[in-house]
Amino acid sequence: MTYRVLAAMTAAVLSLSACSDQGGEASAPVDENAVRVGVLQSLTGTMAISEITVKNAEILAIDEINAAGGVLGKNVEAVVEDGASEPSLFAQKASKLIEDSGVVTVFGGWTSASRKAMLPVFERTGNLLWYPVQFEGNECSPNIMYSGAQPNQQILPALDWAEAKGYKSYFLIGSDYVFPRTANLILKKHIEDRGLATAGEAYVPLGGTDFSGVLAKVQSAGPDIIFNTLNGDSNVAFFKQRKAAGMDAPVMSFSIGEQEAQAMGVELVEGSYATWNYFQSLASDANKAFVSAYQSKFGQDAAITDPMVHGYLNVYAWKAAVEAANSFDPSAVRAAAVSLGTIDTPMGPVSFAPNQSLVQTAYVGRLDGDGQFDIIADSGGDIAPEPYDPLAFPGRTCTPG
């Protein structure tokens, strides 16, 4: 079955300065027979810089669906909760959404720590989480649809590009939690396998702002390039202190998109690199139409990022799977989702593989002075998701069900 995301979709994000809601928000008023879904993102705390706009994208997709007639004859009511950048709170709010609010599915999460905290809740209740952000792999659950990139769809294409550029020495900097630690484990395995060198590795707490010791290690190591898996507003402190230290080693980031760059101040990150599966600057007609419609509603300075598009896509994929299954039951929806076939989106045609992860293309971008990424390389086509890296986790496979 082929499902086409509505051509008229209007993008979904407000600038951070306009976003101060703290949770409990719902989409347009609905009748008492509406079907409820959860939207669970960090609206406060260190991750709010990234997650507020993902919430907006998910809410607007729901509002568009309602305007077009809803799902199976029902309006969709969004129940919004704030994970507040705390993994334990994400778990509590997920349980609240499912057991108290009676939602049939949940859209949200960002950090792997939040996803890991929520996972037992979804497995215990049999509900389904649609997760929109790149992550470290090494996980395979029948209760999560993973639309964000697996390592072989983001960090390894970045390494391919850096190796082709002649970079031989890599310094790995990350926030101290599961995604950066595991992503860097995978990177080190591949760096060694290719005969390259890991010059060093350093971590700071999530939300940490003191990079003096980290930058001293980088300067001592003298790497050709820095691979950055910092998350949230730690990136602001890192790039400010890097600039003050006069460091010129290029930086490749995996959690900085257009929204984060503009919120941080473009001058801090101009000229740095990022690898994602979507950039706002994608030149396709579908993306141009999407960006034009989005900016006509939210202003010419509004930015769209990879996780926002994945969050938006997840809502429409859920709708298509519900209609294919003729049911809101999470198990039926999950089975239908991996049989949908191609989904046409602003990021190009994508589909869910049997392992419940998305087949998608990788792009490398260089940030320009306008806060947009000039696409300088791509993976040459779609990449099938590989939850378990064969070098880091040999012999492991993903067969959810």
Image (tube, rainbow, N blue to C red):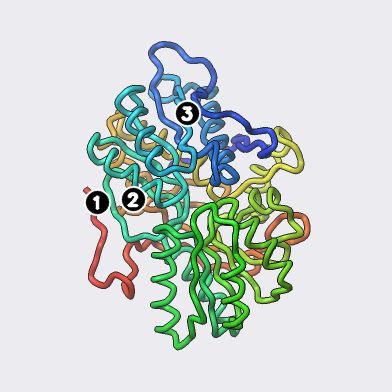
Can you tell which of label 3 and label 1 is closer to the viewer? 3
Residue that label 2 marks: 356
x then y, percent, for residue 123: 25, 41
Q: Is residue 215 left or right of residue 148?
A: right
Circle 3 — which element?
strand
Residue 392's spot in the image, x, y percent?
33, 72
Which residue occupies 34% across, 49% down? 116
Of badges 3 and 2, the one in the foreground is 3
Q: Quadrant of the N terminus?
A: top left
Q: Amino acid at mark 2?
A: Gln
To which quarter of the image does residue 178 belong? bottom left
CA gap between label 3 and label 2 equals 24 Å
Q: Which mark is residue 400?
A: 1
Q: How many neighbours does mark 1 have within 10 angstroms: few (below 14), some (14-19), or many (20 or more)? A: few
Which label is found at residue 80? 3
- First in residue order: circle 3 vs circle 2: 3
Q: Secondary structure at mark 1?
A: loop
Q: Is residue 180 left or right of residue 218?
A: left
